[in-house]
Amino acid sequence: MAIRIQPSRHPHGEVALFDNRTIKASEAFIRGAPVELLSGLAAIFPGGTDVTGLYGFATEDVVAGLSLGANTAQVNIAVADRSTIFMGQLINATVVVAPDIANVDVDYGLVVEANEWFVDEADTTNVHVKVIDFDLDIDIGVVFFKVLESVLAQP
């Protein structure tokens, strides 16, 4: 099972910003999925060539427009901003890869594979995040990243 994208660190000892948003009808996504706001409603961020408007990452699963969290009408989102550092796994094609120093300071896209979201080592064209660090002790493929300012819904 993949390590789902989640907030990891925040400079100066602060905590990441979280927000509850009403879910767009019929949406379905997993914890760790990137989220955008469409007319103020939480919806799955498509990734790929869509490189603007990422609001954050879901901290709860959503099925048929309902959260599996405490408030079924809303989903909790870890908001992406200039400061929050997230963690996830690095993938190339369908394989989680061990990052190294060559991955640090590189911009990558986000990709969904087998219903899990990853940082896509193969995509350096449609970029969403910048890898700033890695950790081989937690699990294979763990990278720490920030969402690129040009991609943020709220820079």
Image (cartoon, grey):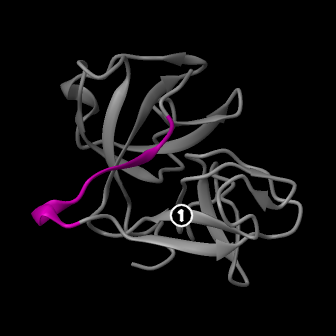
Quadrant of the drawing holding the N terminus: top right
Left or right, 112 with respect to 134, comes to right
Q: Residue at x 60, y 39 (%)?
A: 111
* Circle 1: residue type: Ile
Q: Is residue 132 magenta?
A: no
Judged from this view, the residue extending furthest toward the left is 12
Q: Residue at x 33, y 64 (%)?
A: 16
Judged from this view, the residue extending furthest toward the bottom is 39
Quadrant of the drawing holding the C terminus: bottom left
Residue 109 in percent (x, y) is at: 50, 44
Left or right, 143 with respect to 96, comes to left
Q: Which residues are magenta?
A: 4-14
Residue 106 in percent (x, y) is at: 30, 42
Left or right, 148 with respect to 21, comes to left
For residue 131, what is the image quadrant? Answer: top left
Return the residue at label 1.
Answer: 77
- In this rendering, the answer to whether 142 lies above or below 37 is above
Q: Residue at x 89, y 61 (%)?
A: 26
Left or right, 66 with respect to 95, comes to right
Circle 1 crowding by C-alpha within 10 Å: few under 14, some 14–19, many from 20: many
Residue 21 in percent (x, y) is at: 64, 75
